[in-house]
Image (cartoon, grey):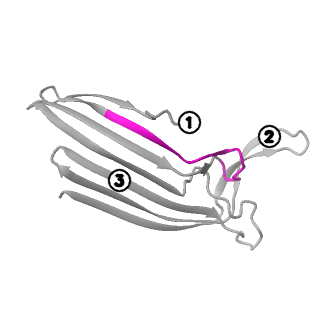
């Protein structure tokens, strides 16, 4: 009951994968946002979660995910796809989070808790066309949750802060 491990893997095949794009009209040159058929695609990956109760007041946790999500080279008719080999939008290949949950009773009815965590994601594109310049380099953020629990009053006061290291992303 002190250790928890969860591992999962998956493999998915898509036909008629829906994607969105900004497409210019031939006559006016105006861009319109449309949803279109991106063709066939494949994604597979794995994720693992680990949690351990070190002592009664301290629990550590970690999560790691690996994702390979790309458009196939040909569509259902065997024709070369426009997005062949591109990665899905907002899909980092690697991501992880590590942190801990700690709490201590000040009195039998007053508990103080703190939960810092660090999350990291590798490079992502913001759209399926994988346009250079419309992407995000790898980044990580340090986040914190903490507060006080008053059990007699059934009241919890907490504060949450994100990106404490002021990472630019």
Which residue is depicted at the point 17% across and 43% down?
57
Number of dots carrying numbers: 3
According to the picture, the residue beneath numbered tag 3 turns out to be 62
Q: Earlier in the sequence, mark 2 or mark 3?
A: 2
Reading the image, the residue beneath label 2 is 31
Residue where numbered disc 1 is placed: 168
Between the C-alphas of marks 1 and 3, the distance is 24 Å
Q: Which residue is rendered at x = 29% and y = 32% of the image?
A: 146
Task: From the image, state whether disc 1 or disc 2 is nearer to you.
Answer: 1
Name the mark nearer the viewer: 1 or 3: 1
- Kind of element beneath mark 2: strand
Pointers 2 and 3 in contact (C-beta within 8 Å): no
Which residue in the rendered view is the most extreme toward the front? Answer: 165
Question: Of the residues under marks 1 and 2, which one precedes in the sequence?
Answer: 2
User: In which quadrant of the rendered view does residue 58 lie?
Assistant: top left
Mark 2–mark 3 distance (CA, rounded to whole Å): 43 Å
Residue 72 % position (x, y) = 67, 67
Assign the N terminus to one quadrant of the image. bottom left
Examine the image and state in which quarter residue 4 appears. bottom left
Direction right: furthest residue:
27
Q: Where does the magenta region start and end? A: 127-145
């Amino acid at each position: 009951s002190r250790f928890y491990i969860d591992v999962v893997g998956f493999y998915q095949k898509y036909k008629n994968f829906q994607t969105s794009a900004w497409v210019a009209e031939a006559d006016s040159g105006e861009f319109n946002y449309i949803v279109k058929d991106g063709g066939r695609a494949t994604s597979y990956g794995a994720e693992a979660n680990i949690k351990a109760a070190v002592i009664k007041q301290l629990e550590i946790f970690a999560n790691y995910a690996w994702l390979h999500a790309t458009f196939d080279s040909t569509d259902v008719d065997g024709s070369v796809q426009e997005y062949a080999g591109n990665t899905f939008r907002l899909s980092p290949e690697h991501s992880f989070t590590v942190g801990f949950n700690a709490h201590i009773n000040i009195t039998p009815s007053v508990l103080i808790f703190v939960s810092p965590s660090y999350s990291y994601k590798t490079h992502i594109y913001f759209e399926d066309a994988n346009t250079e310049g419309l992407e995000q380099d790898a980044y990580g953020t340090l986040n914190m949750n903490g507060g006080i629990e008053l059990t007699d009053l059934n009241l919890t006061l907490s504060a949450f802060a994100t990106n404490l290291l002021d990472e630019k992303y």
